[in-house]
Image (tube, helix red, strand yellow):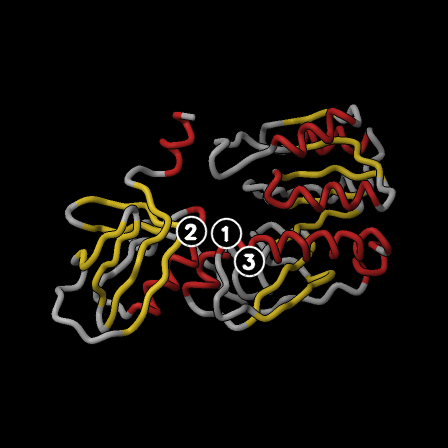
């Protein structure tokens, strides 16, 4: 099947898997990336290797008309921030890969909240493109339980691996899946996480603080310590009665900081005094 892909490296495995399954790419739509949290190097390199034209602006009616001229049969969206509408006159199929067990977790990037809210089950979904985000009928879905020690980075990897498997399912029989797609029904929209939700509250118990750290992983949680803002990617902790005020540094050893929380302590084992974006720009 001839297809166009809209996305970045975040779910670039979908692009690779469809090609591996014998689908022929005719165009890549991507977006500007900061090279810190978002990347498109791999999908762009793959497209250029195959001599596929790359577009870095929002898909419009002119681009869709071009897809019709290219005899494109499917538009596959995965990690593309702009809503694509009005595709129906130009391509027979248009689907989106979304990293949540739809209809729960619609929205721009629900992985953080999945861990913050201690959701028991997560998954990847493939749905028809509709005029509103993440609401189209479901073609395929893969669900899995979240582990008690799940981190953002492990959950991201699990979603990426599931997306490749779903791409293979899609490639095997898209027309049948499209015909049998089931409406989502009522669901939930999860807005983008704020810095406040990303910030550790020292009045929380150690388990709650560690959940916040795990929820952001290498993206880093925020923590106010000694009048400074720290960026934390790994920590451990334990329950213990103590007389320290929450947020007090109770112990230091090399770069490990042990800080008092409500009813226990949290030890930062991987942290920085500047955000990842500024550190990576200096490299």
Q: What residue is at 70 percent from the left and 42 percent from the top?
A: 87
The total number of labels drawn is: 3
Name the residue nearer the viewer: 203 or 243: 243
The residue to which callout 2 is attached is: 192
Q: Earlier in the sequence, mark 1 or mark 3?
A: 1
Say above or below: 100 vs 11.
Answer: below
Q: Which quadrant of the rendered structure holds the N terminus?
A: top right
- From the top left corner, tell me how far across and down residue 229 is, in percent: 24, 45
Q: CA distance from mark 2 to mark 1?
A: 7 Å
Q: What residue is at 56 percent from the left and 35 percent from the top?
A: 39
Q: Earlier in the sequence, mark 3 or mark 2?
A: 3
- From the top left corner, tell me how far across and down residue 265 is, in percent: 26, 65
Q: CA distance from mark 3 to mark 2?
A: 17 Å
Do the CB atoms of the residues marked 2 and 1 lie less than 8 Å apart?
A: yes
The residue to which callout 1 is attached is: 109
Name the residue nearer the viewer: 271 or 190: 271
Q: Is residue 124 left or right of residue 213?
A: right
Do the CB atoms of the residues marked 1 and 3 lie less than 8 Å apart?
A: no
Closer mark to the observer between disc 3 and disc 2 = 3
Label 2 crowding class (10 Å Cα cut-off): few <14, some 14-19, many 20+?
Answer: few
Q: What residue is at 21 percent from the left and 57 percent from the top?
A: 251
Q: Earlier in the sequence, mark 2 or mark 1?
A: 1
Residue 91 lies in quadrant? top right
- From the top left corner, tell me how far across and down residue 41 is, in percent: 62, 30
Q: What residue is at 85 percent from the left and 34 percent from the top?
A: 71
Label 1 crowding class (10 Å Cα cut-off): few <14, some 14-19, many 20+?
Answer: some
Q: Secondary structure at mark 3?
A: helix
Say above or below: 130 vs 209.
Answer: above
Q: Secondary structure at mark 2?
A: loop
Q: Residue furthest front?
A: 253
The residue to which callout 3 is attached is: 155
């Amino acid at each position: 099947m001839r297809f166009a892909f809209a996305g970045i490296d975040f779910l670039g495995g979908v692009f690779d898997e469809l090609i591996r399954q014998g689908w022929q790419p005719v165009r890549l739509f991507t977006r500007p990336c900061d090279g810190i949290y978002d990347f498109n190097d791999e999908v762009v390199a793959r497209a250029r290797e195959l001599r596929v034209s790359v577009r870095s602006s929002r898909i419009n009616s002119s681009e869709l008309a071009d897809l019709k001229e290219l005899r494109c049969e499917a538009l596959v969206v995965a990690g593309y921030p702009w809503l694509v509408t009005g595709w129906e006159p130009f391509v027979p199929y248009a689907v989106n890969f979304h990293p949540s067990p739809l209809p729960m977790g619609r929205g721009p990037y629900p992985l953080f909240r999945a861990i913050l809210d201690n959701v028991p089950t997560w998954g990847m979904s493939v749905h028809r493109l509709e005029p509103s985000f993440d609401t189209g009928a479901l073609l395929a879905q893969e669900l899995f339980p979240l582990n008690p020690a799940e981190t953002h980075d492990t959950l991201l990897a699990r979603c990426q691996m599931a997306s490749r498997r779903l791409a293979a399912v899609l490639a095997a029989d898209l027309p049948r899946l499209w015909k049998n797609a089931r409406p989502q029904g009522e669901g939930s929209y999860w807005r983008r996480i704020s810095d406040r939700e990303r910030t550790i509250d020292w009045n929380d118990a150690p388990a709650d603080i560690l959940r916040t750290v795990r929820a952001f992983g290498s993206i880093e949680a925020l923590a106010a310590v000694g009048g400074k803002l720290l960026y934390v990617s790994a920590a451990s902790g334990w329950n213990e009665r103590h007389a320290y005020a929450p947020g007090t540094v109770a112990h230091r050893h090399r770069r490990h900081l042990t800080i008092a929380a409500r009813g226990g302590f949290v030890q930062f084992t991987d942290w920085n005094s500047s955000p990842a974006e500024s550190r990576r720009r200096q490299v």
